[in-house]
Image: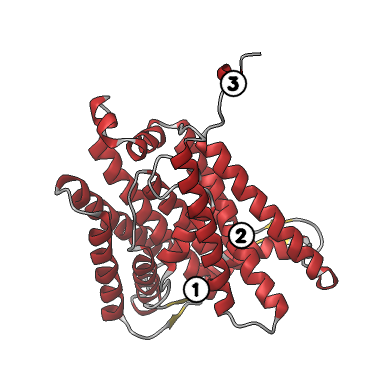
Amino acid sequence: MNLAAIKRPSANVVTLLATIAVFVLLYGLAAARYHDRNFFTLPVFIDFFRDNAYLGVAAVGMTFVILSGGIDLSVGGVVGLTGILLATMIEQKNMHPGVAMPIVLAIGTLLGTLMGFMIHYFQLAPFFVTLAGMFLARGLALVISSESIGLDPPLFLWLTEHAVIPLGGRNRIPFVAIVFVAVAAIGIFVARCTPFGRNTYAIGGNEPSAVLMGLPVGRTKVGVYALSGFCSALAGVVWSLSLWSGNANAGSLMELDAIAAVVLGGTLLSGGVGSVFGTVFGVLILAIIQTSLNFEGTLSSWWTKIAIGMLLLAFITMQRLLTKLGAVRASP
């Protein structure tokens, strides 16, 4: 048998398997520790998706940005802007939610498109452009209203109470969780089965080579940030649906949580390697940590950040070693 002919696993497979292994380990440990409190039950698992739906939606958009070799720090600001704008249009302008929602989604997409245009055509660093976008979005949100605005329209009530998937008994999948799963499924399809997704991987893997191959680098990079802006705006809508309110300070530091979920999901910060499917597991890992601390009841919420920080360091170190040793090969 020719060992040299053995095909090495792709980086996507290796990082995804590492993510799934961590998820299974943490879930198993938590289920064993809190077995008397029904941690390993369907309602708790559904809560992972419901309580982190807005983060998951934003993380899907962030995955495409990081896969392309970029970064988006405007996520939290856009969440706050779209949430307070949605509440203002519905409660103070008497606009129907079915009209207000597409407007705020369009605004988020437009902001992302503008940032992508500046990053590519003016050759500006994504860090600084999206940082400016974060301040712009947060500032506009606070100008609209610095106070929380409650939401109670009939459509929101209907979505919360009736737009669910029954699972028998009292178990049901809430609407916000359905949105998260649907966005993730669409993101997986786009990343793996469309030219846009393949171009995103190619640009993140080696942008000069992508240019030489004649790929639409500019259009793809702008599209990636437009997609992130759309997902951030949708996350703001989901946040409002979850809490029935709009708040200019909503989503504070959410961009960091989204980046953490993407990295824990196996996506390399250097770009070109990763998956939306892995990001879903990254969000679930964060959910397990948060839920475990809630079940513990005696630890400060800051331990969540400590645990996430330790996991991030471990994943980034693993990624660096794999890249340095050449133990895996990158592939879209």
**x 58%, y 79%: residue:** 301
Residue 6: mark in rendering: 3
Q: Residue 177 appears in which quarter of the rendering?
A: bottom right
Camera-nearest residue between 122 and 91: 122
Within 10 Å of the Cα at label 2, are there few (<14), some (14-19), or many (20+) other Cα atoms? many
List x then y, in percent, for residue 168. Answer: 80, 57
Where does the image place residue 247, in percent across and percent down from the top left? 41, 78
Residue 305, compared with residue 207, is above or below; it is: below
Q: Residue at x 47, y 35 (%)?
A: 326
C-alpha separation, residue under disc 2 versus residue under disc 3: 33 Å
**Percent from the top left, x then y, of residue 173?**
67, 59
Residue under the image location 42 percent in, 52 percent down: 61
Outermost right residue? 36
Circle 3 crowding by C-alpha within 10 Å: few under 14, some 14–19, many from 20:
few
Q: Amino acid at mark 2?
A: Ile
Return the residue at label 1. Answer: 153
Task: Look at label 1 and name its amino acid.
Answer: Pro
Residue 175 visible in image: no
Residue matched to label 2: 285
